[in-house]
Image: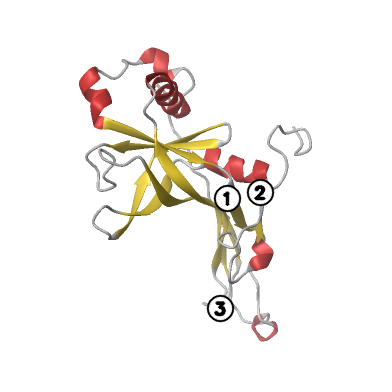
Amino acid sequence: MSTLECPYSGQFAQTERTTPNRSRERVTYERAASYQVLDEALYCDVAFVGPDGAPRVLPTFHVRVGDTLFLHGSTGSSMGLGGREEFPVSVTATVVDGLVYAKSWFHHSMNYRSVVVHANARLVADADERWSVFKALINRMAEGRSERSREASPKENAMSALLAIPLEEVSIKQRQGPSVEEPDDEDLPFENGVADVATVVTGRL
């Protein structure tokens, strides 16, 4: 399916928070490319200010449903999800596609695709929405997995929290291609190149 045919084609609006200070040529606001990274990355990192005023970053499992990103958490976590209703977060998800080896230390790099999301997160409280999102989270691990495992008990459900994050303020930063070399380094007797990187799931149950 081409980007033009993709139901999520188009651009996110550029904002002050999604405008980088450096390497601006690597940043775009393509909705389809951003969603592909969110769908491909196995986990994301969420940054927030805790109830005690201290900044934190936590890795967590996620699933995208349409234009909303859902994160799994615990009501007893350092987010204080047991007592919050809505609070600002920043979420990032990255897929590394290659290690870039250069002739100089400075130009070693990675080929990557990285998405950053800014939003106000809300707790998912509606029972039907919670059930639907939990099912989507389990099925993201393997198609139909929710039908091959037990649903959460009332106690487990009470211990679990879900955050809904609207995908409205989003940017994607990417690097692809070979190493950048200084002209004076071209004749140095060192190898350069790109080693492909891929995340592989070796089995599905």
Point out the frontmost of discs 1 and 3. Answer: 1
Residue projecting furthest to the bottom: 184
Taking the spot 58% from the left edge, 50% from the top edge, the residue there is 170
Q: Secondary structure at mark 1?
A: strand
| Three-letter code, disc 1 | Glu
Disc ID at residue 104 = 3
Disc ID at residue 129 = none
Q: Residues within 10 Å of mark 1 (few under 14, many from 20)?
A: some
Image side of residue 30 versus residue 138, left or right: right
Front position in the image: 9 or 143: 9
Image colouring:
secondary structure
- Percent across and percent down for residue 107 are 57, 74
Taking the spot 52% from the left edge, 45% from the top edge, the residue there is 198
Residue projecting furthest to the right: 4
| Three-letter code, disc 2 | Phe
**Tag 1–tag 2 contact (CB < 8 Å):** yes
Q: Residues within 10 Å of mark 2 (few under 14, many from 20)?
A: some
Considering the image in quadrants, where does the C terminus appear?
top left
- Above or below residue 184? Residue 130 is above
- Percent across and percent down for residue 130 are 39, 24
Q: Secondary structure at mark 3?
A: loop
Image side of residue 161 versus residue 36, left or right: left
Which one is earlier in the sequence, the residue at label 1 or at label 3? 3
Taking the spot 61% from the left edge, 45% from the top edge, the residue there is 34
Q: Quadrant of residue 7?
A: top right
Residue matched to label 2: 12
- Percent across and percent down for residue 62 are 43, 37
| Three-letter code, disc 3 | Ser
Residue matched to label 1: 169
Point out the frontmost of discs 3 and 2. Answer: 2
Q: CA distance from mark 1 to mark 3?
A: 36 Å
Considering the image in quadrants, where does the N terminus appear?
top right
